[in-house]
Image (cartoon, rainbow, N blue to C red):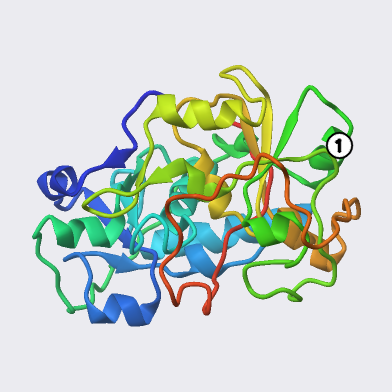
């Protein structure tokens, strides 16, 4: 995909009108305190948990076809998702973009830098809620091959030709925590056997307008540390499926993501887990320059786990 996906605040301002639906993925409380004029609030993008079973995938499709239709997406409009900042919402705006694309929606984008960048640019905000008229969402299977399920991930275990990329926080990778919801939210800790690790924060760098994605060249350099090149098949996973979408910057092709991923294991969907001794960190670990702001981890509506292909 070569079409521009990340918009600057000025680019979004210039295209706003009846043919653009701006989607605020933050909490209702954050939305009420101030948002981009005309934005509709769809917080379920961040909070909804799904499993990687056929039933879980069907529920996910139905849930968000309804949610995006209620937000007034009919196929004619361009959807633009945003969060507070790129490191404070675990990539929830990117999850919105991915879900739309997976559902076959052809016109979706992300506000780069989120609401923080919008405010840093001195652009207007409002506390007036937007009442969406609601439309029929054009659900299709056009993007269905972007996501892999439990069985496909299980089949990839032991296949060294496919990189299983874990993008979760370090405490989840080393096995001291089961999820961003808390150390013992899931009954088991660990990672998929043979997985490689590239912590999601490493895709970003600090700027005056807040954390922003690195360039495609810089991201490919990060990917190289995990043995990934432009033609490498990659199955990504996190806990719920938000952080994993931050890895979808242009540059890495053939990427697949699994909905439910590690999170699915709490319903015993994925049984293969590699045990990790607490405190043992991989030798290549690099501390990211960008960490979430304080307070984010206390209300974790987290990342989604899964392998994706694309």
Residue located 53% across and 79% down the image: 298
Percent position of residue 195, x then y: 77, 40
Assign the N terminus to one quadrant of the image: top left
Residue depicted at x 44% and y 70%: 43
Task: State the image coordinates of residue 87 (x, y, percent, origin top left).
Answer: 42, 57
Residue 307 x/y as whole percent: 69, 42
- Residue 186 location (% of width, % of height): 78, 71
Query: Quarter of the image holding residue 4?
Result: top left
Residue 190: quadrant of the picture: bottom right
Q: Is residue 40 left or right of residue 157?
A: left
**Residue 239 appears in view:** no
Is 252 on the left-hand or right-hand side of 68? right
Label 1: state its secondary structure.
Answer: loop
Indicate whether 235 appears above or below 186.
above
Q: Which residue is mark 1?
A: 157
Q: In the image shown, does 307 or 90 lie closer to the viewer? A: 90
Q: Residues within 10 Å of mark 1 (few under 14, many from 20)?
A: some
């Amino acid at each position: 995909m070569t079409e521009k996906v990340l918009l600057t605040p000025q680019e979004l301002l210039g295209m706003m009108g009846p043919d653009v639906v701006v989607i605020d993925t933050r909490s209702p409380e954050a939305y009420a305190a101030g948002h981009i004029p005309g934005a509709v609030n769809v917080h379920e993008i961040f909070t909804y948990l799904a499993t990687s079973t056929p039933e879980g995938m069907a529920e996910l499709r139905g849930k968000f076809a309804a949610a995006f239709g209620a937000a007034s997406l009919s196929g004619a409009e361009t959807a633009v998702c945003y969060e507070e900042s790129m490191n404070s919402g675990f990539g929830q705006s990117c999850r919105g973009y991915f879900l739309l694309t997976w559902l076959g929606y052809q016109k979706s984008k992300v506000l780069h830098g989120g609401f923080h960048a919008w405010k840093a640019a001195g652009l207007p905000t409002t506390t007036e809620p937007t009442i969406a008229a609601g439309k029929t969402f054009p659900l299709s299977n056009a993007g269905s091959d972007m996501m892999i399920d439990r069985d496909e991930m299980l089949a990839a275990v032991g296949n060294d030709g496919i990189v299983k990329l874990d993008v979760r926080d370090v405490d989840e990778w080393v096995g001291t925590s089961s999820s961003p919801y808390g150390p013992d939210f899931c009954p088991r800790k660990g990672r998929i056997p043979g997985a490689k690790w590239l912590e999601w924060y490493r895709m970003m760098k600090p700027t005056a307008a807040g954390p922003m994605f690195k360039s495609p060249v810089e991201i490919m350099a990060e990917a190289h540390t995990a043995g990934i090149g432009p033609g490498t098949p990659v199955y990504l996973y996190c806990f719920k499926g938000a952080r994993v979408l931050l890895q979808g910057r242009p540059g890495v092709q053939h990427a697949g993501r699994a909905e439910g991923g590690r999170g699915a294991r709490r319903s015993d969907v994925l049984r293969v887990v590699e045990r990790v001794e607490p405190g043992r960190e991989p030798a290549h670990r690099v501390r990211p320059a960008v960490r979430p702001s304080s307070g984010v981890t206390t209300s974790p509506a987290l990342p989604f786990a899964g392998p994706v292909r694309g």
